[in-house]
Structures are given as C-alpha cells and as structure tokens.
C-alpha cells in the first residue's frame, strides 16, 4: 500500500466529528440540506419512477430506504435509486475543477451504509458525509489529471462513496483498501460529452456510481479484493497529503436553478432582465447569449424530456425570461411542453466571447442581450453563475429558502421547515431516523 493511499485510509478511519473545524461542521449541514433537497425534488421525476421500479423488482431486500416513498430494499438498491434522485434535476452542488457533483455521489451511499450498519448517530453520519466529499473531490482531480478526458461524477464518486460507506460499516484498513479499489475498477467510466450532446437519463452516472460504492464496501467486508486505489497515482502528492488540513468541502458551488452549470450564468442574466422589464413572448424579437464555448455547445432545440431541458441553453433562458425561475416546474411536464415557452427557443442565438472563453473553467461568465420588437435593447451585463466560492456563496437563509422551494410541494412546507431545524442540530441525533422519517411524502 502506497503512502498516499495509506494517508487517505487513515483520514477515513481517524476523522472525528468533534475534531472538525467549526466551519467544516457547519458546511456539512449546509451540504446535507442542499443535497437532500435536490434528492427529494428529484424523487418526482420520470427517471425516479423507473429506478424505484427497478430497485423493487431487481433487488428487493429490507436493508435500507428509498427516500420519500419509504420503500425498503437492499442497501445497493437504495443507493442506486437515491443516487438517481439526487442528480435528476441537476440542482445539486458541484466542484468546478472536477466539473461534477460530489454531494449527489456522497449522500446515497452514506444513507444506505448507515441503515445497513445500524446504530449510526447524527455525528457519525455527518462525519462520513464530510469524508465522502473530501475523498471524492480529490479522486475527481486525480482521475482528470491522469486520464485526459472529461470523466463523469460516478467514475470518481464511487471511490469516495465506498470509503465513507466502509467507514460506517466498520471496515478495517485492508478492507477499505479493497473497497476503494473495487469501486474504482467497477465504477462507470461514462462518455460525458456524449451525455451532453444527447441528453439521457444516465446523466452524470451518479446513480450507478452510488450502487457500485455500496456493493464494493459490502464485497470487501466479505473478502473481495480490489486493485490499488488511485490516490497513489496523484501527480501532486500534496493533493492527498493535505486531507484533514485543507477542506475542499468549503470550496463547493451551489445551484439555484435546475439547469446545467454551463447555462447558469445565462439564466442569471435572463432573470436580471426579466426582473427589470417583465417581458412577454410577443415583445421579444431576439435573445443573444454571449458566453464561453462549452456553453454554446448545449442544445438549443425544443426539449423532448426533462434531461434535454436541463442540458439546454435556450430552454432555461426562455423559462427564466417568462417564469422568473428555473426549477422543477419548468423542466417537468406540462410546463416543459407549453407553446409560449417553446416559441421563444428559435429566437435564442449564442456567440463565443474570447475573453469569457479565456476565463473558463475557473469562471463561467455570460451576458444576455434581449432585443424587443419595438427596438429596445436590454443587457444583463457580464454576469457569472450565482453561489460560487469564495465570495458569492449562498447564505444559510438562501439554502433554507431553496430547500423549502424544492421540497414543500412534496413533503409539505411545515415538514420542510421542521426538517431544516433538525438538520441544524443533526450532530445530536441518536440515530438517522429524523432524516429518514422527515423525508416521507405528504399524504393527501
């Protein structure tokens, strides 16, 4: 076992809630709230219906919970279904330098392992979540540094999920080595750009990565051997050795809109214009989105489904201009197919701005220019995606409002606000029952 892998395993086994810095403890609760909100909202999507059915029919069991519906299945099945829920609306957190979603990769395996192992306190749960974020971000950085292709979140998230799950399941050092190695070997290596060019339900391969994470920990517990995990492949040893010293969970971005991160600055620009001018479809002659090249590659045609609506540039911009928000309502039927929205799509044009391209991916700027039928021209000015580190992160109140916005229609606003209060004191939970029970759908 190499030094860097040894250090990653030591971090996994030795980290304790009471030793985490105050800002990391607080961020863990923010991340739990935000990722859980995305998961609850995502449970109402078409892909969620398919994955619930798949989990029940193909796995069965009574080890863990499919969130919101409360159905009991095997730990692997729960992680699979909940993993698909977490990224179903593309409104979960991300880390810019891996172009992916650590939270949606972390929460489902930690949930499943906590239920499988039993006796998991709130402090245990939050600590495992932090471990999954820290290892996942580094695994993503190493994966991208050693293989020059855009990797899906599931490809590196599975490794971190296996480590965090193994921690909760009581795996020993050697077993954790094999769990992470098995997860790396069996993780989905998804062709991300094909998934963007032709949006489909596989999304960022997060659901499959979550299932691999839990299965890898279970198999390693029972003696399965895995390859040497990727931490020793790191071209920069400090990336791993600073585990426990540099907390990357503090450097996440959050997402206010149900859209690809590349489209988010344009959405922010469109919202700025609509707040100031309240345009109707018949007033809009042309919309120009000036941005970086990757964003201009997002499809602009009428979306046929939820996934195409999220991986679009024109659709969320049009929704922002007309509805003043881009959330579950906009990217799900019936709003997804309504004529007033679709009529605007062919009026959206994109152009690459050289100075914006030079800033990407460290920054993701855009400018939206709306020309009206009566000759006015409205500009958003240069604008970046909201809720970015280090200076534009959402407040706790912002994340609470987002949580209620996403979950209120499903579990009810009273229950949503109660769950928020419980999350802020999650380290005091004697078990994770408040989390499992708090997410149950409201009954009419």
Image (tube, rainbow, N blue to C red):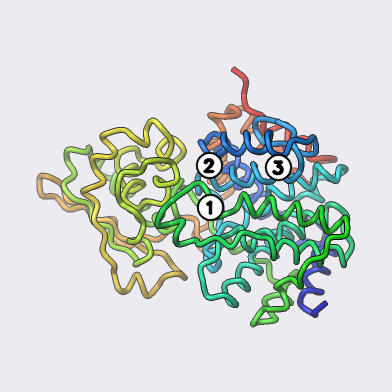
Query: CB atoms at circles 2 and 1 under 8 Å apart?
Result: yes
Disc 3 secondary structure class:
helix
x and y, in percent, of residue 430 in the image:
85, 40
How packed mark 3 is, by other alpha carbons closer than 10 Å (few <14, some 14-19, many 20 or more), is many
Q: Earlier in the sequence, mark 3 or mark 2?
A: 3
Q: Earlier in the sequence, mark 2 or mark 1?
A: 1
The residue at 63%/35% (across/down) is 52
Q: Dot 3 corresponds to which residue?
A: 77
Residue 250 lies, with reference to residue 308, above or below; the image says below
Q: Earlier in the sequence, mark 1 or mark 3?
A: 3
Disc 2 secondary structure class:
helix
The residue at 56%/54% (across/down) is 93
- Mark-to-mark CA distance, 3 and 2: 28 Å
Residue 404 is left or right of residue 325, and the answer is: right
Query: CB atoms at circles 1 and 3 under 8 Å apart?
Result: no
- Given residues 34 and 193, the one toward you in this image is 193
x and y, in percent, of residue 42 in the image:
55, 40
Choose top left, top right, bottom left or bottom right for residue 103.
Answer: bottom right
* Number of the label disc, if any, that sits on residue 402: 2
Assign the C terminus to one quadrant of the image. top right
* Number of the label disc, if any, that sits on residue 394: 1
- Given residues 226 and 88, the one toward you in this image is 226
| Circle nearer the viewer, 2 or 1 | 2
Residue 404 is left or right of residue 302, and the answer is: right
- Mark-to-mark CA distance, 2 and 1: 10 Å
How packed mark 2 is, by other alpha carbons closer than 10 Å (few <14, some 14-19, many 20 or more), is many
Viewer can see residue 275? no
Q: Which residue occupies the extreme front position in the image?
A: 58
The residue at 44%/67% (across/down) is 363
């Amino acid at each position: 076992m190499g030094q860097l892998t040894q250090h990653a395993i030591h971090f996994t086994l030795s980290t304790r809630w009471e030793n985490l810095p105050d800002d990391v403890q607080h961020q863990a609760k923010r991340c739990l709230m935000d990722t859980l909100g995305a998961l609850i909202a995502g449970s109402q999507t078409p892909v969620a219906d398919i994955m619930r059915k798949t989990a029940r029919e193909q796995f069965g069991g009574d080890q863990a919970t499919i969130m919101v519906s409360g159905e009991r299945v095997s730990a692997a099945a729960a992680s699979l279904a909940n993993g698909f829920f977490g990224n179903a609306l593309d409104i979960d957190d991300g880390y810019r330098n891996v172009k992916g979603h650590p939270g949606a990769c972390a929460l489902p395996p930690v949930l499943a392992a906590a239920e499988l192992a039993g006796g998991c306190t709130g402090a245990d749960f939050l600590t495992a979540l932090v471990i999954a974020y820290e290892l996942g971000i580094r695994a993503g950085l190493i994966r991208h540094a050693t293989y020059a292709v855009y990797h899906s979140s599931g490809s590196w998230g599975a490794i971190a999920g296996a480590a965090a799950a193994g921690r909760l399941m009581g795996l020993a050092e050697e077993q954790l080595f094999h769990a992470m190695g098995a997860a790396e070997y069996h993780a989905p290596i998804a062709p991300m750009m094909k998934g963007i060019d032709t949006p489909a339900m596989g999304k960022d391969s997060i659901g499959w990565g979550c299932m691999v994470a839990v299965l890898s920990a279970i198999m390693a517990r029972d003696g399965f051997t895995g390859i040497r995990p990727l931490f020793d492949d790191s071209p920069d040893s400090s990336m791993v050795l600073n585990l426990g010293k540099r907390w990357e969970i503090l450097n996440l971005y959050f997402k206010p809109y149900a859209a690809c991160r590349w489209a988010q600055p344009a959405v922010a620009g469109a919202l700025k214009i609509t707040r100031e001018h309240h345009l109707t479809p018949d007033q809009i002659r042309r919309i120009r989105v000036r941005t970086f090249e990757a964003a201009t590659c997002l499809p602009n045609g009428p979306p046929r489904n939820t996934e195409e609506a999220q991986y679009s540039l024109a659709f969320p911009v049009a929704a922002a201009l007309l509805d003043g928000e881009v959330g579950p309502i906009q990217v799900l039927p019936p709003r997804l197919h309504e004529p007033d929205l679709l009529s605007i799509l062919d009026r959206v044009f994109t152009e690459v701005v050289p100075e914006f391209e030079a800033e990407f991916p460290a920054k993701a700027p855009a400018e939206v220019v709306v020309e009206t039928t009566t000759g006015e021209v409205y500009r958003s000015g240069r604008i970046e995606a909201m809720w970015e580190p280090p200076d534009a992160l959402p407040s706790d109140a912002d994340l609470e409002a987002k949580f209620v916005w996403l979950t209120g229609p499903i579990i009810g606003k009273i229950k949503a606000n109660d769950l928020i209060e419980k999350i802020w004191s999650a380290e005091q939970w004697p078990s994770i029952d408040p989390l499992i029970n708090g997410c149950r759908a409201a009954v009419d």
